[in-house]
């Protein structure tokens, strides 16, 4: 039997969360086309016939500008020192930049086996893929290089087999029915935040957060009551989330409630409020409350 930890590492928007969700078969990480969507460490466990893999999804490595971003990057870098196998996820549909070179520099002193997953190959013509593979082969002694598409599943099973190949022998670390270490409250906040990101498009890229104020278990009416506050940084952003005559927040609430009911397997009453809190991304206490790990 093989057992151990595999951490996904990469730049923002490389597709790490999509890959985690596909492998584990559960939606553990919210996904959007906006960078820095994943803000904390998310664990997903998958059992195989010959082993158990504990996957760790981390925030994208980027240049931090706020305390929140510093924490995000620290979480990603800490994972490099705490796992059995590293998986560098690279988006081959975009040109490599300074961020990619920085990640390769970080890997220089790593003794952990590193597998390279060249993601989004469904968006690139095969002739263009070969020089990219050649470039990375000469950039680091990767134990394996696997071209994949986390979106359509191309070669994902091949990648999983490579993880098992390079993990140490050992007994399962978690029970067979264990999926994640994140509490229900975390997923509730993330589901609401995902809808905020999707509905507001490019108007509020990084300046929103969702605080779960209260969750009341179902009573006689079998409805779970959930109360959340959507935080924005500036007064001018509040009308964007609320919308004309409350149309936007109603749209966000309707979509989030449907997703919550699927996730919680319960009828849900969702109450959303919008609050302005300037510079919340530098508020250590609030970051703790949001579950953004402190290094």
Image (tube, rainbow, N blue to C red):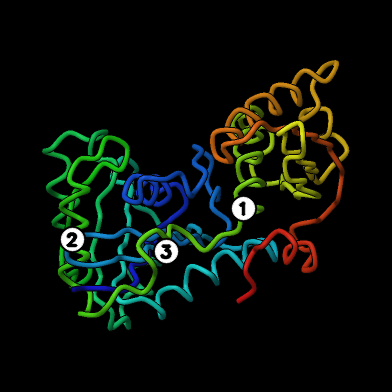
Distance between mark 1 and mark 3 Cα atoms: 18 Å
Foreground pick, 111 / 84: 84
Q: Earlier in the sequence, mark 2 or mark 3?
A: 2
Neighbourhood count class around disc 2 (C-alpha, 10 Å): few under 14, some 14–19, many 20 upward: few
The residue to which callout 2 is attached is 49
Which quadrant would the C terminus be assigned to in this image? Answer: bottom right
Foreground residue among 167 and 154? 167
Above or below, 119 relative to 245? below
- Give the residue pinned by disc 1: 184
Q: Nearer the viewer, mark 1 or mark 3?
A: 1
Label for residue 94? none
**Residue placed at 69% from the left, 27% from the top?**
252
Structural crowding at the residue carrying mark 1, measured as other residues with C-alpha within 10 Å and reported as few (<14), some (14–19) or many (≥20): few
Q: What residue is drawn where x is 81% and y is 50%? A: 213
Residue extending farthest to the front is 220
Residue 5: image x %, image y %? 34, 71
Disc 2 versus disc 3: distance between alpha carbons?
20 Å
Label pair 2/3, CB-CB below 8 angstroms: no
Residue 236 visible, this angle: yes
Residue that appears at 77% across and 39% down: 219
Local SS, label 3: strand
User: Horizontal placement of 178 versus 202: left or right?
Assistant: left
Q: SS class of the residue under badge 1? A: helix
Q: Residue 201: horizontal and vertical position, in percent? A: 61, 29
Give the label on residue 56, or none. 3
């Amino acid at each position: 039997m093989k057992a151990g930890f595999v951490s996904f590492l990469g730049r923002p928007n490389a597709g790490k969360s999509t890959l985690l969700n596909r492998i584990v078969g559960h939606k553990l990480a919210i996904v959007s086309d906006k960078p820095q969507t994943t803000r904390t460490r998310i664990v997903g466990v998958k059992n195989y016939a010959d082993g158990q893999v504990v996957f760790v999804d981390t925030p994208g490595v980027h240049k931090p500008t706020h305390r929140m971003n510093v924490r995000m990057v620290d979480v990603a870098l800490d994972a490099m020192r705490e796992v059995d196998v590293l998986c560098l996820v690279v988006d081959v549909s975009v040109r490599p930049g300074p961020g990619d070179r920085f990640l390769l520099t970080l890997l220089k002193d790593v003794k952990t086996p590193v597998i390279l997953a060249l993601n989004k190959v469904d968006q690139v013509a095969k002739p263009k893929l070969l020089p990219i593979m050649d470039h990375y082969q000469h950039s680091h002694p990767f134990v394996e290089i696997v071209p994949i598409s986390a979106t359509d599943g191309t070669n994902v099973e091949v990648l999983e087999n490579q993880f098992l190949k390079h993990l140490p022998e050992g007994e399962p670390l978690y029970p067979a029915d264990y999926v994640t270490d994140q509490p229900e409250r975390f997923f509730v906040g993330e589901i609401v935040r995902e809808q905020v990101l999707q509905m507001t498009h490019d108007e509020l890229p990084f300046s929103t957060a969702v605080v779960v104020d209260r969750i009341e278990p179902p009573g006689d009416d079998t409805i779970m009551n959930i109360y959340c506050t959507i935080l924005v940084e500036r007064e001018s952003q509040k009308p964007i989330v609320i919308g004309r005559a409350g149309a936007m927040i109603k749209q966000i609430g309707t979509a989030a409630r449907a997703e919550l009911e699927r996730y919680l397997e319960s009828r849900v009453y969702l109450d959303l409020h919008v609050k302005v809190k300037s510079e919340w991304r530098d508020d250590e206490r609030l970051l703790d409350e949001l579950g953004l790990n402190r290094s």
